[in-house]
C-alpha cells in the first residue's frame, strides 16, 4: 500500500475538488490518503510510517517539491521528479524520437526569428507546461503576444520545437513504472519507440505522450512526471488498478 498525498484547498483541510475522485479511488484500493497544503507548506494527516508516500496533484516547482519531500520521504526523489517534469531533464535522452527542439532564453528573439524564417512556424513551450493554442507561433508578433498573455518571466528559458504536422489520430498517454509501460484500455506502446524506455530507465514513474505524423510514424510529444500528469484518456479507476497499484508493489528506488 501507499500513502497518496493530494493537494488541499489553500489553508483548508479539504481536498481540492479536482482531485476528489482520485482520493476516493485511492481509498477504495486500500491506500492511505493525506493532503498537502502548498501554501502553508504542511501536511494534513501524518502519513503511515509503514508505507512509502507518493504525490498525486498539481505541478510543483522544484522548491515546492523539495519542501514536500522534507515533510515525508517520497518514492520519487527530487532529482528524479525534475528529470521527468522539466524538458531539459529528458529531451537529450530521447532527441531522436521527438521533434527537434531548442532551449532558448525568452529575450533571445533573434533565435526565434531564425527558426521562423527556416520553418515558418514553431511550437513554444515552457520547460514544464504548454501555452495551449497560443504555443504555435508564426511571427515575432505572435511570440510577443504569447509572452504578454501568459506573463512569461523574462528570465525564463523556453522549450522551442520545430513544428511537425500530426495525423488526426488521437494523442495517447502512457504511464511507465520502472520501465514497464501501460496504455489506457491496454493500448500497446509503439514498438518503434521501445529504445526510449531504456533511455529513460533512470526515471521511475513517468508518462510518455505519443502522437503520429502524417505518415503514421509515432513520435514522442512530451515526457512528464507521473505524479503531476493528468489522466487524459485514462479513467481514474484504470489508472489505479493498472499503474498506481504497481507503484505500490515495487521496491523503493536507490537514492
Image (cartoon, rainbow, N blue to C red):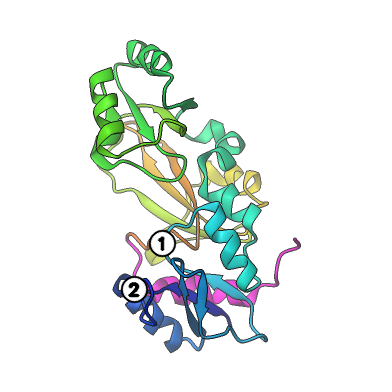
Tell me the chief SS of the magenta region. helix
Q: Which residue is mark 1?
A: 58
Query: Which mark, by number, is residue 253?
Result: none
Q: CA distance from mark 2 to mark 1?
A: 10 Å
Counting residues from the N terminus, which is met first, the one under dot 2 or under dot 1? Answer: 2
Number of residues whose C-alpha sits closer than 10 Å to that of mark 1, classed few (under 14), some (14–19) or many (20 or more): some
Is 229 located above or below residue 16 in the figure? above
Q: Is residue 199 above or below residue 138?
A: below
Q: Is residue 15 above or below residue 199?
A: below
Q: Residue at x 62, y 66 (%)?
A: 69
- What is the crowding at mark 2: few (fewer than 14 residues within 10 Å), some, or many (at least 20)? some
Residue 184 place in picture, x, y as percent:
39, 63
- 34 and 41: which one is in front? 41
Q: Residue sitting at 28 percent across and 37 percent down?
A: 167
Residue for point 37% across, 71% down? 10
- Check the picture and name the quadrant holding the C terminus: bottom right
Q: Label for residue 16?
A: 2
Q: If the image is split into quadrants, where does the N terminus sit?
A: bottom right
Query: Disc 2 vs disc 1: Cβ atoms closer than 8 Å?
Result: yes
Snapshot quadrant of residue 7: bottom left
- Magenta residue span: 233-255
The local secondary structure at tag 1 comes to loop
What residue lies at 57% left-to-right and 46% top-to-bottom?
194
SS label for mark 2: loop
Q: Position of residue 115 (x, y in %)?
A: 39, 16
Q: Is residue 75 left or right of residue 227?
A: right
Verify whether residue 243 appears in magenta.
Answer: yes
Where in the figure is residue 15, as x and y percent of width and height? 36, 78
Q: Quadrant of residue 176?
A: bottom right
Amino acid at each position: 500500500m501507499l500513502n497518496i498525498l493530494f493537494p488541499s484547498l489553500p489553508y483548508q483541510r479539504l481536498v481540492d475538488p479536482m482531485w476528489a475522485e482520485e482520493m476516493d479511488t485511492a481509498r477504495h484500493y486500500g491506500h492511505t490518503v493525506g493532503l498537502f497544503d502548498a501554501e502553508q507548506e504542511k501536511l494534513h494527516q501524518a502519513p503511515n510510517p509503514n508505507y512509502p508516500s507518493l504525490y498525486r496533484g498539481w505541478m510543483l516547482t522544484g522548491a515546492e517539491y523539495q519542501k514536500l519531500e522534507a515533510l515525508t520521504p517520497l518514492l520519487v526523489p527530487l532529482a528524479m521528479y525534475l528529470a521527468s517534469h522539466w524538458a531539459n531533464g529528458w529531451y537529450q535522452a530521447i532527441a531522436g524520437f521527438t521533434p527537434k527542439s531548442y532551449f532558448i532564453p525568452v529575450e533571445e528573439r533573434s533565435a526565434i526569428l531564425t527558426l521562423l524564417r527556416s520553418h515558418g512556424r514553431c511550437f513554444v513551450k515552457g520547460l514544464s507546461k504548454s501555452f495551449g493554442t497560443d504555443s504555435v507561433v508564426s511571427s515575432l508578433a505572435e511570440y510577443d503576444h504569447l509572452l504578454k498573455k501568459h506573463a512569461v518571466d523574462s528570465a525564463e528559458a523556453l522549450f522551442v520545437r520545430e513544428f511537425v504536422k500530426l495525423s488526426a489520430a488521437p494523442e495517447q498517454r502512457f504511464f511507465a513504472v520502472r520501465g514497464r509501460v501501460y496504455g489506457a484500455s491496454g493500448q500497446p506502446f509503439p514498438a518503434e519507440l521501445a529504445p526510449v524506455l531504456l533511455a529513460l530507465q533512470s526515471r521511475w514513474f513517468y508518462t510518455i505522450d505519443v502522437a503520429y505524423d502524417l505518415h503514421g510514424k509515432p513520435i514522442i510529444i512530451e515526457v512528464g512526471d507521473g505524479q503531476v500528469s493528468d489522466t487524459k484518456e485514462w479513467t481514474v479507476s484504470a489508472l489505479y488498478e493498472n499503474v498506481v497499484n504497481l507503484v505500490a508493489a515495487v521496491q523503493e528506488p536507490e537514492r
